[in-house]
Image (cartoon, coloured by chain):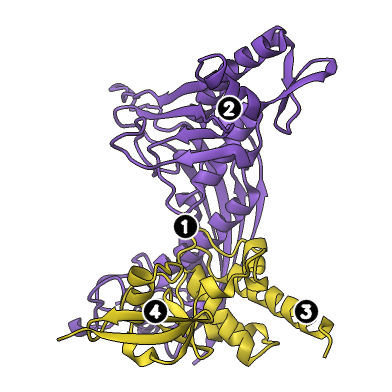
Chain colours: A purple, B yellow
Amino acid sequence: MARLRGTGIAAVNYPTGMNLGGDPSQALIHATTSGSFVVSLSATDLGQGLKTVIGQIAAETLGVEFGEIVIDTADTDTGPHDMGTFASRATHRVGNAVIAAATEARQALLEVAAEELEAAVDDLEGDGHGNLLVKGVPTRSVRIAEIASMAQFKYGRTIAGRGAYMKPKSLVDPETGAMDPDSTEAHACTVAEVEVDTETGVVTVLSIRSAYEVGRQVNPALVQGQIAGGAWMGMSHALYETTAPYYPAVDHSPRDFSEYLMPGPLEMPEIECVVLEMPSSNGPYGVKGIGEMTANSPIPAIANAIYHATGVRFDDLPITPEKILRGLDAKRSGPS
Amino acid sequence: MASTIVAFELGGREVEVMVKPMTTLQSALRDQLGFTATKEGCRQGGCGSCTVLVNDEPMLSCLLPVEDVAGQRVTTLESLTPTQGLHPLQQAFLDANAFQCGYCTPGMTMLAQALLDHNPAPDRGDITQALTGNICRCTGYGPIVRAIEVAAQAMHAGEEGQPR
């Protein structure tokens, strides 16, 4: 009996967004009397950080500080329409809609400020710290928060913007089969190292190392979080997760998701990544989607590493200890 | 069966709740006392998101009848959090980005506090072993382990700086 080591590699091209009946997102932005900007969406934050990156995009486009943005994803009954958070689409689709809404809202803001400062809209600029000023005349400036208040109490105006982004439906060409299913694609390559115990069939993942090309990173810390969490989920899918019995007796099967087997902290491999930025042409500030893809390439990389270690090809997930032992037995007994 | 009044210490204050038999500490904290930092994950002792300290020991509040903490000292994330700023563990979790959705974080923080109470200078193996009852579905655990390492060092340094 032995512990066999192997290394496997796998790559993924991952689409951002989808192509059903068109893939729209909408956003509405308005300023409150205190100078906060509320971004109303129906796309939800699943915990991956959508509110953070959309807040960053809105702040950048409006020219206000991040802390002034309030993201409201309260209610799909009352919010502007969105297809939802899936297909690694939300930062791309919602971000584009928010840029459009923020551009319109900024124009409204500048018009009020121009009136207050008795200057032309084109002569105004932001200082990035919550002020608008007349170009070349730093003494003539006004707080954005004050303009927001004045708009409502002095000028009777709204500071608001509407934004929509849609990937139009793309039909399949009946002659060639060609279509345009997504908006952009992110890419990754993963190298996994495993150790296979030939006595127990247990696979230990030693490391998962990846290189990602994800377009512009709005928030590098969240990108790193997605990649590490995704590597973990991929490892779990490759080796653990099944609703079928882990061993032949049916009463060993999980009864619900609380008994569904997944790796814990003791199974933690070394997870490393490098990120390359090649901005997309159509994403907000060059974004591509990095969500689901992070759980993709670790799976075949681990399967390939097991093949490298054992010489047995497993093409059915998860690769449980039982499958490993049966595979090793079949290899020992030779071709039947 | 009739309700009874249970009194215990919560974050340095005496509190009383009127509960039916077998009401859990988790339910009393969240639903009656409004202490919602303690999360409700699996409600069967499998995930650790409801971890609180009872007399400084980590306990799963979803499995603990509130009668059992009568007269005892309960600590939740609310009472760990200073009035100003953050606890060193909270700061370390923030700096290490040791969460995405954040649902496991209160339980992880309380568990880490209990670990550091018992072992002020844990190595990576001690930390990993301590985390085995607490599930995180987002981070892959690496950032959480690193955050606890950093917090342990910060808290250790802070203690050494205190006059004896």
Give how far apart the Cα atoms at labels 4 and 2 are.
45 Å
Give how far apart the Cα atoms at labels 3 and 4 are.
50 Å
Secondary structure type for disc 4: helix
Letter of the chain that mark 4 sits on in the rendering: A
Give how far apart the Cα atoms at labels 1 and 2 are.
25 Å
Image quadrant assignment for residue B113: bottom right
Q: Picture coordinates of residue A225 (x, y %)?
A: 57, 57
Residue at the image point whose x is 54% and y is 81% from the top: B12
Q: Is residue A180 above or below residue A1?
A: above
Proximity of marks 4 and 2: CB atoms separated by less than 8 Å: no
Letter of the chain that mark 1 sits on in the rendering: A
Q: Which residue is mark 3?
A: B158
Question: Do we see residue A286 in this rendering?
Answer: no
Q: Which one is in front, A90 or A163?
A: A163
Give how far apart the Cα atoms at labels 4 and 1 are.
22 Å
Q: Which residue is mark 1?
A: A295
| Amino acid type indicated by mark 2 | Ser
Q: Label for residue A281? A: 2
* First reached walking from the N terminus: tag 4 or tag 1: 1
Q: Which residue is mark 4?
A: A324
Q: Label for residue A235? A: none
Give how far apart the Cα atoms at labels 3 and 2 are.
50 Å
Letter of the chain that mark 3 sits on in the rendering: B
Q: Is residue B12 above or below residue A235?
A: below
Q: Is residue A333 above or below residue A25?
A: below
* Mark 2 crowd level (few <14, some 14–19, many ≥20, 10 Å Cα): few
Proximity of marks 3 and 4: CB atoms separated by less than 8 Å: no
Image quadrant assignment for residue A113: top right
How many discs appear?
4
Q: Which one is in front, A136 or A336?
A: A136
